[in-house]
């Protein structure tokens, strides 16, 4: 009887241990295996073009190994080469080992990355693997580097008026880096009456299909029978155009600097900028006794402000604070003439 009881006791212990192991469940690897990109190939080139907007680019990678079957979410990430993926743009996320995007979709991600349009960009790409709602580690594939040429999807339009002598050949291009079919341009208007008027032309140097106000008093655009658009008085204005809704609007602006300056921590504008009609820039200076973060803002309010995502010298609407790391006196310029491709506003900070 004792022998039988001992056997039953041992059997029971094994049963309990087995049950405990089952209750613990499968264990995720402490060092999961990372995915690897197979398509596109490292060092390959891709030229995106507007006529091929519906053509597709394929992405393929191997599975991440977490030691057990899991619902892994894979995210394709891109960044400018050599930036260590800071900043980065997420291209797509799927529960699969492959995905395709239209050229137009992929192109929009490159625009979001602020890649240069119509020229070759060196772009890093990687795959991030995660298990949603778990404590499993996030894994990343090794990066590959490609040469990618994106295209500008949105056509230019131009602003012409008394401010440039009604010269269609020198009409400045409106900033087309806004979402949808929205455009904007900052213009310094001087004088009165007819000197404050302007129109839109779709082709620089040509008056064909020029657009203006439709006479209804609703700021609606018209191509036929239109009148000139206008600002109410002299000043530095942001002119906005929305070709989806065929509307236009203006906003008078002055510019200043606000930040974490000693004695004025994000209170009122710390420095006021002055418009330079020769350079077309806003200029000013500030003194800081320590490292400081700051931004540009219009009209001493927060509805329109610029920071710098990525500290690349290009301004972003509502972007990250600009960092000045050492005490000193600095000269600042704000350039709201859209430059580059994609078009961007820029600034300089020079220590005196």
Image: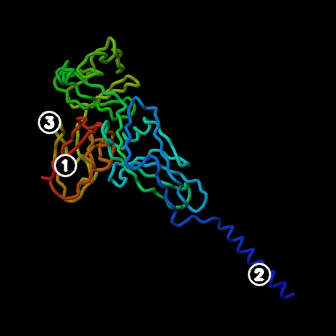
Determine which residue is flagged by label 2: 10
Q: Secondary structure at mark 2?
A: helix
> In the image as oriented, which residue stretches furthest toward the top?
225
Which marked residue is nearer to the observer: mark 2 or mark 1? 2
Q: Name the side, left or right, on which 33 lies relative to 188.
A: right
Q: Quadrant of residue 18?
A: bottom right
Mark 2 Cα-neighbour bin, 10 Å: few <14, some 14–19, many ≥20? few
Residue 200 appears anywhere in the view: no
Determine which residue is flagged by label 1: 349
State how far apart marks 3 and 2 are (Cα).
91 Å
User: In the rendered structure, which disc, 2 or 1, sits on the residue that comes first in sequence?
Assistant: 2
Rendered residue at 35%/55% (across/down): 84
Residue 224 appears anywhere in the view: yes
Front position in the image: 220 or 131: 131
Q: Secondary structure at mark 3?
A: loop
State how far apart marks 1 and 3 are (Cα).
16 Å
Determine which residue is flagged by label 3: 279
How many labels, in total? 3
User: In the rendered structure, which disc, 3 or 2, sits on the residue that comes first in sequence?
Assistant: 2
């Amino acid at each position: 009887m004792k022998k039988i009881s001992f056997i039953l006791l041992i059997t029971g212990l094994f049963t309990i241990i087995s049950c405990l192991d089952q209750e613990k469940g499968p264990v995720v690897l402490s060092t999961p295996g990372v995915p690897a990109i197979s398509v596109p190939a490292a060092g390959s080139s891709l030229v995106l073009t507007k006529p091929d907007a519906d053509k597709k680019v394929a992405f393929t990678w191997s599975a991440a190994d977490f030691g057990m079957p899991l619902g892994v979410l894979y995210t394709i990430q891109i960044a400018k080469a050599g930036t260590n993926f800071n900043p980065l743009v997420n291209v797509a996320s799927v529960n699969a080992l492959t995905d395709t995007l239209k050229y137009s979709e992929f192109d929009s991600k490159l625009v979001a990355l602020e890649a240069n349009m119509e020229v070759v960009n060196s772009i890093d790409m990687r795959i991030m693997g995660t298990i949603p709602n778990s404590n499993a580690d996030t894994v990343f594939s090794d990066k590959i580097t490609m040469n990618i040429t994106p295209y500008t999807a949105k056509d230019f339009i131009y602003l012409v008026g008394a401010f440039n002598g009604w010269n269609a050949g020198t009409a400045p291009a409106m900033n087309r880096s806004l979402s949808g079919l929205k455009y904007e341009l900052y213009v310094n208007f001087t004088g009165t009456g007819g000197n404050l008027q302007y129109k839109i032309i779709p082709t620089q140097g040509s008056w064909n299909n020029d657009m203006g106000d439709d006479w209804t008093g609703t700021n609606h655009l018209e191509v036929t029978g239109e009148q000139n658009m206008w600002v109410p008085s002299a000043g530095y204005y942001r002119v906005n155009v929305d070709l989806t809704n065929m509307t236009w609007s203006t906003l008078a602006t002055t510019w200043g600097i606000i930040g974490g300056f000693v004695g004025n921590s994000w209170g009122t504008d710390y420095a006021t900028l002055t418009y330079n009609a020769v350079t077309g820039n806003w200029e000013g200076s500030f003194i800081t006794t320590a490292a400081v973060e700051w931004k540009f803002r219009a009209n001493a309010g927060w509805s329109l402000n610029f920071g710098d995502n990525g500290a690349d010298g290009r301004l972003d609407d509502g972007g990250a604070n600009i960092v000045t790391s050492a005490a000193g006196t600095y000269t600042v310029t704000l350039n709201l003439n859209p430059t580059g491709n994609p078009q961007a506003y820029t600034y300089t900070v020079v220590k005196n």
